[in-house]
């Protein structure tokens, strides 16, 4: 197995990094927050023009039909840039859900718009504290009622893919019977909402039992995004300690600082290897996808948390302030750590799928 990018994937990464590097300087992110913007609409249009939104959507539906690893390359660069776009909600979750579980008619109706960026989707699974995917929302006779929260990017979305247990349905959000209420979000560049459905029209997807697979595939992309954010934190911390003098010497010359950043680098390499393995497992529909996805998810959570926290630490007192750029990544890391299930959820999933293991046999049932 080759754990390296192909020449084409390296070119894709360079294109994405070049565009995002130009369009997402930290001053721009601050302006988005100050203006109360929920997203970077101009950047979204440019991502669509570059074909990034349709990268993993089939060619028959207006996409490029690329692989999960190709999509991971884009996710990694979006994480590095801390971009304020609904890529994870619309492309990684909503479009993927329709591709996995939708009928031919549903795919033909929605995937071209998602690939072009004209349609934005979100994924509504949680019903507050409790299981990752709640089942209290009821969809009967093409009508849906109940509440989902928090739902990322629901304020700008046109459709929501709603998960209730093992069932998935597409709900247009601009219709009577749907109420969206904005919630406080720790990551100010990713708005979250509560959605109340009151006998709203819902289009149930025929593919039942796809929710766990969808979340496995999303976990791999989340891992790539976290790897990009981790590498940005490490680069930011390195730049600072090389420039910052302390008692006549660069801060980077002190052994304690070197050890901190070396630990971060090791964690990132482990997370990156697991993300690549997860991408391979998705593309090959491998039987051990649940293990690969959980390993990628857990190692990425750990690496990004360590990188974001140590970045704050090496910046000293200023690292905690809004004047420092560290907090962008710390907030994104906190959001990514829980958005598709927390560490305990994915640890349980990993243990439950370890083959021929006494641990697996004694593991409690999963919460998905």
Image: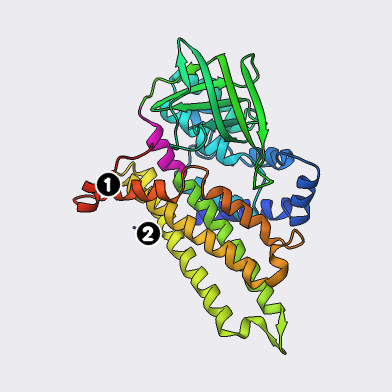
Where residue 100 sits in the image (x, y, percent)?
42, 30
Where residue 254 sits in the image (x, y, percent)?
60, 85
Residue stretch in magenta:
209-218
State the separation of the CA atoms marked 1 and 2: 33 Å
Instruction: Single out the residue that lies furthest toward the front.
Output: 129
Q: Is residue 73 visible?
A: no
User: Measured along the vertical axis of the image, is residue 224 above or below residue 365?
Assistant: below
- Secondary structure of the residue carrying tag 2 is loop
Label 1 belongs to which residue? 363
Dot in front, 1 or 2: 1
Label 2 belongs to which residue? 2
Q: In the shown orientation, is residue 123 left or right of residue 48?
A: left
Q: Quadrant of the C terminus?
A: top left
Instruction: Single out the residue that lies furthest toward the top.
Output: 141
Where residue 279 sits in the image (x, y, percent)?
42, 49
**Quadrant of the rendered structure where residue 309 is?**
bottom right
**Front residue (pair 63, 361):** 361
- Mark drawn on residue 46: none
Q: Quadrant of the N terminus?
A: bottom left
Instruction: Look at 57% across and 35% down and name the residue there.
Output: 150
Chief secondary structure of the magenta span?
A: helix
Where residue 316 sits in the image (x, y, percent)?
68, 72
102 in the magenta segment: no
Q: Is residue 252 visible?
A: yes
């Amino acid at each position: 197995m080759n754990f390296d990018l192909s020449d084409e994937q390296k070119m894709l990464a360079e294109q994405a990094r070049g565009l995002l590097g130009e369009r997402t300087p930290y001053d721009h992110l601050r302006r988005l927050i100050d203006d109360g913007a929920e997203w970077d609409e101009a950047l979204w249009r440019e991502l669509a023009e570059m074909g990034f939104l349709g990268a993993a959507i089939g060619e028959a539906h207006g996409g490029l039909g690329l692989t999960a690893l190709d999509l991971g390359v884009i996710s990694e660069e979006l994480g590095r840039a801390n971009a304020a776009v609904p890529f994870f909600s619309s492309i990684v979750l909503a479009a993927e859900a329709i591709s996995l579980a939708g009928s031919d008619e549903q795919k033909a109706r929605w995937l071209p718009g998602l690939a072009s960026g004209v349609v934005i989707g979100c994924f509504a699974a949680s019903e507050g504290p409790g299981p990752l995917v709640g089942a209290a929302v009821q969809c009967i006779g093409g009508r849906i009622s109940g509440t989902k929260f928090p739902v990322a990017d629901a304020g700008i979305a046109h459709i929501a893919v709603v998960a209730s247990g093992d069932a998935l349905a597409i709900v247009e959000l601009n219709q009577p019977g749907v109420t969206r209420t904005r919630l406080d979000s720790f990551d100010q560049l990713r708005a979250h909402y509560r959605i109340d459905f009151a006998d709203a029209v819902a289009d149930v997807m025929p593919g039942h039992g796809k929710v766990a697979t969808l979340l496995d595939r999303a976990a791999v992309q989340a891992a790539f995004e976290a790897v990009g954010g981790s590498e940005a934190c490490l680069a930011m911390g390195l730049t600072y300690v090389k420039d910052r003098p302390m008692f006549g010497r660069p801060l980077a010359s002190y052994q304690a600082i070197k050890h901190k950043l070396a630990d971060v680098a090791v964690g990132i390499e482990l997370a990156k290897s697991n993300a690549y393995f997860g991408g391979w497992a998705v593309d090959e529909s491998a039987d051990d996808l649940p293990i690969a996805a959980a390993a990628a998810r857990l190692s990425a959570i750990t690496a990004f948390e360590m990188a974001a926290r140590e970045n704050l630490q090496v910046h000293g007192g200023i690292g905690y302030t809004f004047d420092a750029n560290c907090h962008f990544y710390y907030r994104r890391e906190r959001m990514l750590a829980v958005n598709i299930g927390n560490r305990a959820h994915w640890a349980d999933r990993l243990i439950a799928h370890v083959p021929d293991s006494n641990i697996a046999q004694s593991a409690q049932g999963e919460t998905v």
